[in-house]
């Protein structure tokens, strides 16, 4: 037995071809495959979706990395403006009246990842993290375009507002109250993103646009 196998053998709960065998491994996978899944089992802790977009990956990434485009493809994020902190913007989440949302964009051009770090009401701790990645469709689907993935993790603050004193009014619903609708809501927004990118790319239009505030200046 190799040193690596000996070390792995000491870890309880591993299921590998070495200790389960082909038939047992296949049977175990069949047990984990169901025709119907409870909502909480699929979307309880993580919300992940993905979409094929007929737009070059470089253009799709460039669009996503520019945070002002959130005002185009999201359902409710509007009126972003810079704060006094470099890279931090504040806008309104019209999902609820008088609700401010803070956002910072962290992007990696080599991996084509775009992470939106956000929070309602305050910009000190950006705990609502939206993780997005653009994958060249040629690599994974053997056709032009992009595959875009989007994941949210259920941070504990979704269940317990850490700063209720900062809410615009005591009866304002909390963002975590909408968690069960995240998959549906994000699906609508992903379809918006797809429609915008494909419309502009297929029409020979610039995919990215100048921020509205810059145009007004």
Image (spheres, grey):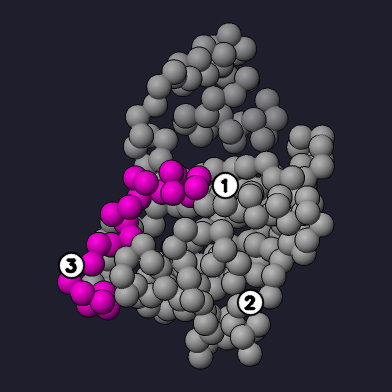
Looking at the image, is mark 2 or mark 3 earlier in the sequence? 3
| Residue 94, x across and y down, in percent | 38, 67
Which residue is found at the position 43% from the left and 43% from the top?
A: 184
Q: Is residue 133 left or right of residue 82?
A: right
- Local crowd at mark 2 within 10 Å, few (<14), some, or many (≥20)? some
Q: Which of pointers 2 and 3 indicates the residue nearer the eye? A: 2
* Residue for badge 2: 211
| Residue 195, x across and y down, in percent | 63, 50
- Image quarter hosting the N terminus: top right
Q: Is residue 174 part of the magenta span, yes or no? A: yes
- Residue 14, disc: none
Boundaries of the magenta span: 165-188
Report the Cα–Cα distance between label 1 and label 3. Answer: 32 Å
Quadrant for residue 66, please give it: bottom right
* Residue for badge 1: 191
Q: Is residue 7 part of the magenta span, yes or no? A: no
Observer able to see residue 125: no
Which residue is found at the position 64% from the left and 30% from the top?
A: 5
């Amino acid at each position: 037995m190799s040193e690596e196998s000996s070390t792995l053998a000491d870890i309880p709960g591993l299921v590998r071809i070495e200790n389960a065998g082909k038939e047992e491994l296949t049977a175990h996978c069949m047990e984990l495959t169901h025709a119907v899944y409870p909502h909480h089992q699929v979307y309880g802790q993580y919300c992940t979706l993905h979409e094929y977009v007929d737009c070059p990956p470089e253009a799709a990434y460039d669009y996503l990395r520019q945070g002002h485009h959130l005002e185009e493809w999201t359902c409710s994020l509007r009126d972003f403006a810079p704060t006094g902190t470099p890279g931090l913007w504040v806008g309104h989440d019209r999902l609820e009246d008088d609700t401010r949302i803070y956002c910072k964009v962290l992007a990696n051009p080599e991996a084509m990842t775009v992470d939106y770090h956000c929070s309602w009401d305050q910009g000190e701790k950006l705990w609502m993290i939206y993780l997005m990645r653009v994958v060249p469709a040629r690599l994974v689907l053997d056709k032009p375009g992009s595959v875009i993935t989007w994941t949210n993790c259920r941070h504990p603050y979704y269940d317990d507002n850490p700063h209720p004193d900062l809410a615009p009014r005591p009866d304002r619903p909390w963002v975590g109250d909408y968690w069960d609708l995240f998959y549906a809501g994000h699906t609508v927004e992903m379809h918006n993103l797809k429609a915008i990118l494909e419309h502009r790319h297929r029409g020979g239009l610039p995919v990215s646009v100048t921020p509205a505030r810059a145009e007004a200046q």
